[in-house]
Structure formats: C-alpha cells, structure tokens
Image: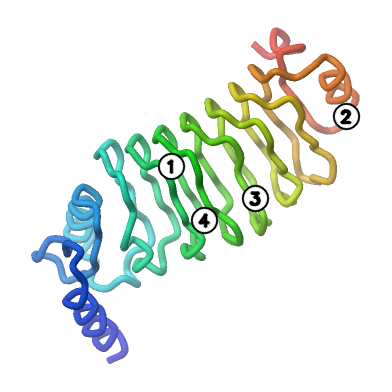
Amino acid sequence: MIRIRCLFLLMGYALSTSLPVIASNTVLPIKIADKALSECIAAQANKYDWKVVEDVHTLKCHSMDIRSIEGLNTLTQLKSLSLYNNKLENLDLREFSQLEHLNIANNKLRTISLVNLSHLHTLYLFKNKLVTVDFTGLQKLSKIRITNNQLSSLDISPLISLEKAYFFDNKLEELIVKGLPKLKFIELRQNPMPDEVYDRYDALDGITIVHDGNADDWK
C-alpha cells in the first residue's frame, strides 16, 4: 500500500513540472531534464523492471553526451552512479546521501560538491578540469582517483578511511598526508613538487608514495 501511494505521489509530481518525463513504457515516472540521461534511465528501468524509485540502486550511463543531472535526485536510494565520458561541467551531489560508488571521470568538470556523502567509499574523477575538491564529511572514502585534472590545492585530512589515492598529472606543489591511519599508497607523479617535499615523503614509514623523484623505481 505504501509503495502504491509513493508511486501515485511521483505521478503527481511528474504532471506538475515541465521537464520531460522518461519513456512512457516504464512505470518509473520521474522528471529528467537531460534527454540522453532520461533515455538511459528508461532503458535500464525496462531492463531491470524498476517500478518505483526505491528499486533503483545502480545507474550506469556512459558516453551519451549527458550535460545535466537535473531531476536525478529523485532517485533517493541510488548507491552507485557512473556517468563516465559525458559532458558534465558542474555537479552538486550533496543530496545523494546513499551514494557508495561514484564515477564521473572523463567529463568537463570544473566544480563538484560532495560534502557529507558519508557512505561514499570509491570516487573516480580523473580526466576533468577540477582545481580543488572539498572532502568534508567523506569519512568512509577509501579509494580516490583524481588524475589528469588541474588540482592546485587539496586537503585530504577529512579522509580518515583513505587507503589508496591517485593524483598524478595535476598542479600540486604540496600535499599533507599526516593523520590518515589507513593510507598505504599514494601516486603523485607529474606534479610540480620541489625536492624537499619528495624528501619528506620518503621519510614517512608505512606509506608508499610514488613521485617524480622515485618514479623509475615503480615502473
């Protein structure tokens, strides 16, 4: 009875907004602004027999020229989102409170808001145009890959569960890695870090840090 009521409420919402609804041959009546994203959701709703938003835990839409995720926050139980190789430029994902896995790699991202995604454990943002990322509240994040960006400053101190991190090919001159008890590996090649920073990294015990000063040792 509750699921039926939820479905009717969503149908009412669908009629009250001007955004295009996803394909009518599915009973998941949510509003998605971007046509390509709408079509991707419709196809997967049909494939996996999604009936209501609570059924949707994983969404994968690659290489579809998606430019907006407006309306996607209706999928309140989304745990895994993969939008690899699209055309997204600015994202605010703070409403996606259940996310555990996120892949927005190979887009055109200049900004992304991830604050307080307390369940997120894997994050892929490589091949974008990010200058910095705020990791506040991401206490379960254990693996990140933000290579091939424009990162010039970064504070990873909130990432108390971080185990592996990849930041090569950015513009970082410094990265403080103290206070991260689970960190075992970090990749920092192709960043403009001075030799004294390399020396400080090499003196740390228990963490493998690959940088331009020792890169040949890890080939």
Amino acid of disc 3? Phe
N-term-proximal mark, 3 vs 4: 4
Pair 1/2: label in front: 1
| Disc 1 from disc 3: Cα separation | 16 Å
N-term-proximal mark, 4 vs 2: 4
Pair 4/1: label in front: 1
Tell me whether circle 1 and circle 2 mark residues in contact (CB < 8 Å): no
Is 189 placed above or below 108 here? above
Mark 4 falls on what kind of element? loop
- Local crowd size for mark 3, using a 10 Å CA cut-off: few (<14), some (14–19), many (≥20): some
N-term-proximal mark, 1 vs 2: 1
Mark 3 falls on what kind of element? loop
Q: Which mark is residue 69?
A: none
Disc 3 target residue? 135
Tell me whether circle 4 and circle 1 mark residues in contact (CB < 8 Å): no
Q: Examine the image and state in which quarter residue 139 appears.
A: bottom right
Q: Which mark is residue 100?
A: 4
Which residue is depicted at the point 37% across and 56% down? Answer: 58
Amino acid of disc 4? Glu
